[in-house]
């Protein structure tokens, strides 16, 4: 059974700092990996999706990398801003077909960027 | 383009009462998901539909939970009777095609409090 772990559970940084959020997964047979952002009381917003054949994806100040063989992904946020404060979740989508094909989420990293 | 729409956003009920949540997915998205999210945790899948067929309901507590997706568009998730432990956020998500890409788009969720 796939397990997804995100460490740390919470992170607080001063504004302007570059930071890295970590995600690890136990089963490397994945189709893709997705990073989401969740603001308090809100749903999940997709940030980046990395296909299993890709090494990284970039969107603005965000860069996500994927090392499938080691079961790791990182989300790099450059020049952090208070508006980046949210919970960041990673989720993996398996290669298997049929009923087993569902996203498995980590518990998230709660990020606070201090002004 | 409208996103995934859920209602109600908030619901407070007493235990043993019934409750229903409604979801309207993104137009053209064939795959619809219901997730349960407890505080500080990642979402967990309850049921996945491809068109009107429930292809994965293995994690749906069928003694009290039921779901339907008539005509393969809108979906309703019902709990009857509700228990204290059902207090959580119920998230609906949709995906284009038959879920091949694994890219999910989430609604803002329905927060249930059972007293």
Image (cartoon, helix red, strand yellow):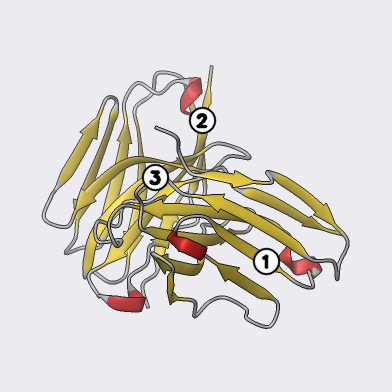
Q: Nearer the viewer, residue B37 or B5?
A: B5
Image location (x, y in percent) of residue B114: 81, 60
Residues at marks 2 and 3 on the same chain: no
Spatial CA distance of label 1 from label 2 is 33 Å
Q: Which mark is residue B78?
A: 1
User: What residue does disc 2 label?
Assistant: A85
Q: Same chain for marks 1 and 3? A: yes
Crowd tier of the residue under label 2, counting other residues whose Cα lies within 10 Å: few below 14, some 14–19, many 20 or above: many
Image quarter where the N terminus of chain A lies is bottom left
Instruction: Check the residue under mark 2 and report the chain it is in.
Output: A
- Residue A52 seen anywhere in this rendered image of the structure: yes
Chain containing the residue with disc 1: B
The residues bearing labels 1 and 3 have C-alpha atoms spaced at a distance of: 23 Å
Give the chain letter at badge 3: B
**Left or right, residue A69 beside residue A64:** left
Residue under numbered circle 3 = B27
Q: CA distance from mark 2 to mark 3?
A: 31 Å
Tell me whether the residue at label 1 lies in contact with that at label 2, contact meaning CB atoms closer than 8 angstroms.
no
In percent of the image, x 65 and y 49: which residue is there? B110
x 56%, y 68%: residue: B68
């Amino acid at each position: 059974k796939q397990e997804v772990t995100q460490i740390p559970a919470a992170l607080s940084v001063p504004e302007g700092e570059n930071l890295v959020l970590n995600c690890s997964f136990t089963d490397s047979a994945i189709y893709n990996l997705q990073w989401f952002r969740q603001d308090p009381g809100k749903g999940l917003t997709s940030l980046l999706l990395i296909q299993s054949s890709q090494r990284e994806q970039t969107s603005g100040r965000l860069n996500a990398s994927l090392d499938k063989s080691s079961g790791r992904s990182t989300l790099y946020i450059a020049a952090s801003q208070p508006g980046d404060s949210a919970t960041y979740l990673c989720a993996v989508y398996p290669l298997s077909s049929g009923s087993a094909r569902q996203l498995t989420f980590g518990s998230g990293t709660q990020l606070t960027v201090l002004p | 383009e409208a996103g995934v729409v859920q209602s109600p956003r908030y619901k407070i009920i007493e235990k043993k009462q019934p409750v229903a949540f409604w979801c309207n997915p993104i137009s053209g998205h064939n795959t619809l998901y219901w997730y349960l999210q407890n505080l500080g945790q990642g979402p967990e899948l309850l049921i996945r539909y491809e068109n009107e067929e429930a292809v994965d309901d293995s994690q749906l507590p069928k003694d009290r939970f039921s779901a339907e997706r008539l005509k393969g568009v809108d979906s309703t998730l019902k709990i009857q009777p509700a228990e204290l432990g059902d207090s959580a956020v119920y998230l609906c998500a949709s995906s284009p095609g038959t879920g091949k890409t694994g890219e999910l788009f989430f609604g803002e969720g329905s927060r249930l409090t059972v007293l």
